[in-house]
Amino acid sequence: MNFANMLTLFRIILAPVFLIFFFLPKDFSNWIIPVLWIIFIISEITDYFDGFAARRLNLTSDFGKFFDPFADTLVQITYFLCFLIDGIWGGGVIPVFLFLLIIYREFGILFIRNLMQRKGITLAARMSGKIKTVIYIIAVGAALFAVSIERLGLYENLLTYFKTGALLIFIISAAAAVISFIDYLVIYIKTAGAK
C-alpha cells in the first residue's frame, strides 16, 4: 500500500461519506451542500494526485492499475446512485435507464479486465476511459449544482434549465461510456481474444 494507493483508498472512503451526507435531512442543506461540494472536490483532486504520484514517484503497479479504476467506478456509481434516488423521491436529474447503462458498462469492463487478467494481460486505463471519466465528473458537477440550488431555494425559476442541462450531460456521459466499452472490447478481441 504505497502513497498513491493510499490516496486511492482515501477516495474510496469518501464515497460512502458523500452518500451519508447527501441523504441527511434537507432541513440542514445550508451546511450539507458545502460539505458535499468539499467531498466531491477533494475526491476528484485525490483522483488526479494518485495517478500523478504513481507516475512521478515511480509507484505504478499492477495492483494500482486495478485499484484506481475500481475506485473511480465506486465513487462515480455512488454519485449517480445518489442522484437517481433523489430523482425518484423528488424529480432529480438522472433517469433509471441512464444509470443502468452506466452500470452495465462498468460491469462489462470489469468482466473484460478479468478475462484479460486470466490470460496474463493487465488492461490499463485507456484514453477513451479517461475521457469518459472526465465527462462523468462534469455530469456529477452539473447534477450537484442543480441539487444545490434546488435544496437551497436559489434561482427557482431557472431550476428546470439547470436540471435539463445536467440531464444532457448525463446523456453525453452515457454515450461516452458505451464508446469507451467498445474501445476496451476491441482491445480485448485484438489481444487476449487472439491468445
Image (spheres, helix red, strand yellow):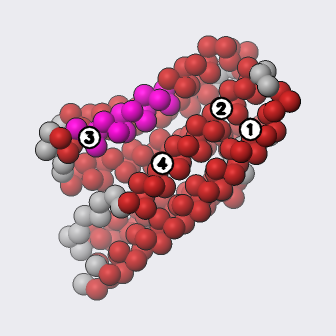
Residue, disc 1 = 162
Q: Are marks 4 and 1 in contact (CB under 8 Å)?
A: no
Where residue 142 appears, as percent x and y from the top left, is 63, 39
- Distance between mark 1 and mark 3 Cα atoms: 33 Å
- Please give left or right for residue 29 compared with residue 78 in the image: right
Secondary structure of residue under mark 4: helix
Residue, disc 3 = 52
Dot 4 or dot 3: first in sequence order is 3
Where residue 4 appears, as percent x and y from the top left, is 24, 38
Range of the magenta residues?
A: 39-53
Q: Is the N terminus in the top left, top right, bottom left or bottom right quadrant?
A: top left
Q: Amino acid at mark 3?
A: Phe
Q: Is residue 116 visible?
A: yes
Residue lying farthest to the left in this orientation: 58
Residue, disc 2 = 145
Q: Quadrant of residue 147?
A: top right
- Distance between mark 1 and mark 2 Cα atoms: 8 Å
Q: Residues within 10 Å of mark 1 (few under 14, many from 20)?
A: many
> What residue lies at 86% left-to-right and 30% top-to-bottom?
157
Disc on res. 134? 4
Q: Amino acid at mark 4?
A: Val
Q: Quadrant of residue 3?
A: top left
Dot 1 or dot 3: first in sequence order is 3
Magenta stretch: dominant SS? helix
Q: Are marks 1 and 2 in contact (CB under 8 Å)?
A: yes
Q: Residues within 10 Å of mark 2 (few under 14, many from 20)?
A: some
Q: Is residue 17 visible?
A: no
Secondary structure of residue under mark 1: helix
Where residue 93 appears, as percent x and y from the top left, is 72, 43
Where residue 149 appears, as percent x and y from the top left, is 72, 26
Q: Are marks 2 and 4 in contact (CB under 8 Å)?
A: no
